[in-house]
Amino acid sequence: MAALGESNLNKKSPWFGLFCFSLAIFLTLTPVLAAGSVKVEKVTENISQPSLDCRISYPHLDGINNQDMQERLNVFIKERAKTVETKAQYNAKFEKVNAVMDFKVTRNNDGIMSLVIKDKISSAKGDNYSQTSLTIDTVTGRRYFLSDLFIDNADYVEMLSGQIKNQISRTGLDKKQIKTFKRISANEDFYLTPDAVVVYFEQGEYFSNDCAVKEFAIPLNTLSGILKPRIWRA
């Protein structure tokens, strides 16, 4: 992915030389994980300008049997990276900005792959955090939503909400609430690890900005009986 190609500038423009001097983009495609049936490669792009330092890494998926779904997922991920880059470049028009985006594959076994993409855009005004996650079937490429993890008629919303409330109280996060947490939505943002389902809330959604994105890991063994067997086996 390129933030801005040479073709976007007229080579006769006086800004062209400055552009070439100030913008350094290095694109790499490095294998970082090949587990199960899906290979995840790391695409890295660095942009250096007088008012912008932008380091972006995002995953490229390969090996999903459904090629159409694989392409859609890769387009979705690339657009997410482009959004972060565009926002950073816009903010850099007014102030010095440092932007970082990276990802982690948190599970890739038993036909399920889960990853989380995190970004931070920093300036003198403060740090802005955001994240996106994907959990997919490694054969079909179908995306899992939170409700897909549980058997029919399972009261997972109340079970997860109860555990999150306990964690908020136990860790003192209740003192950081800007809005009282009551319950998650039926398809709250999440990702999987081998041992937990991690539910998260965006910066400023329930807690003060200094808390960044807040994650709550719910051990899978505490959800025994309502998880689908493919998600976790006791």
Image: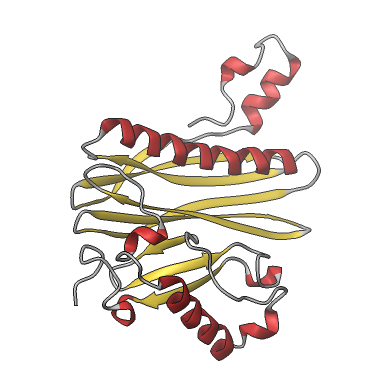
Residue drawn at (47%, 68%) of the image: 199
Pick out the residue farthest to the front.
153
Residue 99: x and y, percent? 61, 50
Which residue is at 35% across, 32% downward? 71
Residue 169: x and y, percent? 58, 88
Q: Residue 208's x, y, as percent?
A: 70, 72
**60 lies above or below 144:** above
User: Along the line of sight, which residue is nearer the eye, 227 or 116?
Assistant: 227
Q: Quadrant of residue 168?
A: bottom right
User: Residue 203: horizontal and vertical position, in percent?
Assistant: 64, 63
In the foreground, 72 or 117: 72
The residue nearer to you, when weighing 209 against 112, is 112
Q: Along the horizontal axis of the image, is 101 left or right of 43?
A: right
Can you say whether 102 is above or below 79 in the image?
below
Relative to 60, does residue 190 appear above or below in the rendering?
A: below
- Report the coloring of the rendering: secondary structure
- For the C terminus, the image quarter is bottom left
Relative placement, left or right, of 221 versus 133 is left
**Which quadrant holds residue 213?**
bottom right
What residue occupies the far bottom of the structure in this picture?
A: 170
Q: Nearer the viewer, residue 45 or 50?
A: 45
**Residue extending furthest toward the top:** 12
